[in-house]
């Protein structure tokens, strides 16, 4: 394979970035907008970076139609740090939070919150193997909860909520790492939406946090500044040196998404890609077995199994030789996982489906 040949990267993250974005970044790598310096060299206090930061923020705000009473922060530490920051800021002594758990990341979020205080499980699908997301009418929350937390798309199990969760007036915190910007969402329904960038927003190293003003006002005094949403918002995400390169890339990805027609258009494209792959699974006479229940299937992360683990390993090895990388399921569950985020092309899904048919015929 030629060293410059692009392959199909099915990794759950860091994931594919749109080629036009990579090409634009390459063009400006040595000199951002003709200023004679790379974005990785300019001061984060300069007017040059101020424009970069504002551009990225406006891109997110435009695409998600973020209301004016929300701040957009560009932080670091990924969703993992948010698992800790949310309860540190909003779970005070004597209070409790409720967690809806539909997979590994929701489990981890609640586990980390328990270090801070009373983090209760309001609903979990653990006993059924994390194969589904609940319907809205199956959920019951206490009106006294400090907040309700859920993961809108579980990358490991391939389970996705098909609606914006409503907690009846209790602040809702959403870990939207793996499906943010893949479709429109009602930001106004949430107190906080957070997401690591490395799926649909840009490169790893940036975490986008969209937080409502009234939540910022609830932050108690005396927090460690780098873990304090109020301080971070007051300093416009620049309490310390931010990931200047990553934020620049977020702005370029937002431009690309707008060029594709915005999030409504991306939703349609993503659903079409996923349908091609799920149809191949469903029409395989059981050779390929999807993990998630049909009503909860993730559009972003398609998870399935083969008849045995040896065949799964052979499947991944042969796919790699054909230019399809990252298909092995998460180490905790095995199987196959095809992550087909915004930047993943339809041609790559069709290439995989063709390989799946040939593999089943050869090894069935």
Image (cartoon, rainbow, N blue to C red):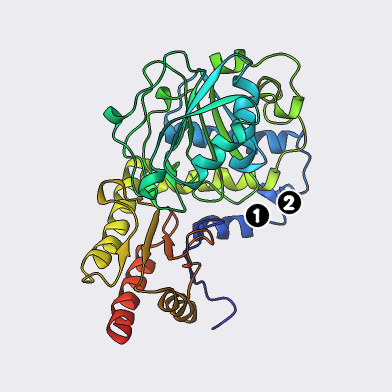
Residue at the location (60% across, 79% down)?
3
Name the residue nearer the viewer: 47 or 328. Answer: 328
Farthest residue to the front: give it: 127
At a point 77% along the width and 44% down the height, the residue shown is 42
Question: Image check: 128 left or right of 219?
Answer: left
On screen, 309 above or below 248? below
Residue 318 in percent (x, y) is at 45, 81
Picture coordinates of residue 74 (x, y %)? 63, 35
For the N terminus, the image quarter is bottom right
Q: Which quarter of the figure is the C terminus placed in?
A: bottom left
Q: Circle 1 sits in a helix, a strand or a loop, which is it?
A: loop
| In front of the other: 227 or 53 | 227
Neighbourhood count class around disc 2 (C-alpha, 10 Å): few under 14, some 14–19, many 20 upward: some
Front-lying residue, 245 or 314: 314
Q: Residue at x 33, y 28 (%)?
A: 139
Q: Which mark is residue 38?
A: 2
Left or right: 52, with 279 as reference point:
right
Q: Secondary structure at mark 2?
A: loop
The reply to whether residue 56 is in sight is no
**Dot placed on the residue nearer the N-terminal end, 1 or 2:** 1
Q: Residues within 10 Å of mark 1 (few under 14, many from 20)?
A: some
Image marks 1 and 2: residues in contact by CB distance under 8 Å: yes
- Residue 36: x, y in percent? 76, 51
Q: Quadrant of residue 79?
A: top right
Left or right: where 129 falls relative to 107? left
Which residue is at a point 30% across and 79% down the rendered structure image?
A: 360
Camera-nearest residue between 330 and 340: 330
* Residue position marked by numbered label 1 in the rendering: 28
């Amino acid at each position: 394979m030629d060293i410059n040949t692009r392959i199909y990267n099915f990794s759950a993250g860091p994931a594919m970035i749109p080629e036009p974005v990579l090409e634009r970044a390459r063009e400006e790598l040595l000199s951002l907008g003709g200023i004679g310096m790379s974005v990785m060299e300019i001061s984060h206090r300069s007017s040059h970076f101020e424009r970069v930061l504002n551009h990225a923020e406006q891109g997110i705000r435009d695409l998600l139609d973020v209301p004016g009473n929300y701040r957009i922060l560009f932080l670091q530490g990924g969703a993992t740090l948010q698992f800790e920051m949310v309860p540190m800021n909003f779970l005070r002594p004597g209070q409790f939070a409720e967690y809806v758990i539909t997979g590994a990341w929701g489990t981890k979020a609640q586990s980390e919150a328990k270090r801070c205080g009373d983090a209760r499980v309001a609903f979990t699908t653990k006993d059924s193997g994390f194969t589904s997301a609940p319907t809205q009418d199956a959920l019951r929350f206490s009106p006294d909860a400090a907040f309700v937390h859920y993961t809108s798309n579980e990358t490991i199990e391939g389970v996705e909520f098909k609606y914006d969760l409503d907690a009846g007036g209790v602040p809702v915190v959403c870990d939207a790492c793996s499906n943010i910007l893949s479709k429109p969402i009602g930001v106004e329904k949430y107190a906080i939406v957070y997401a690591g960038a490395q799926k649909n927003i840009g490169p790893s190293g940036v975490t986008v946090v969209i937080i409502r003003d009234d939540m910022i006002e609830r932050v108690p005094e005396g927090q460690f500044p780098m873990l304090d949403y109020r301080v971070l918002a007051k300093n416009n995400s620049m309490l310390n040196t931010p990931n200047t390169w990553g934020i620049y890339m977020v702005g370029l990805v937002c431009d690309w998404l707008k060029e594709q027609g915005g999030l409504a258009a991306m939703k349609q494209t993503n659903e079409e890609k996923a349908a091609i792959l799920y149809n191949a699974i469903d029409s395989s006479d059981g050779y390929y077995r999807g993990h998630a229940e049909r009503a909860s299937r993730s559009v972003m992360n398609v998870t399935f199994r083969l008849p045995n683990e040896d065949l799964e390993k052979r499947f991944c090895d042969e796919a790699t030789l054909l230019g399809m990388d990252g298909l092995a399921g998460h180490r905790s569950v095995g199987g196959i996982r095809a992550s087909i985020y915004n930047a993943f092309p339809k041609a790559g899904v069709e290439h995989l489906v063709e390989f799946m048919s040939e593999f089943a015929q050869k090894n069935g």
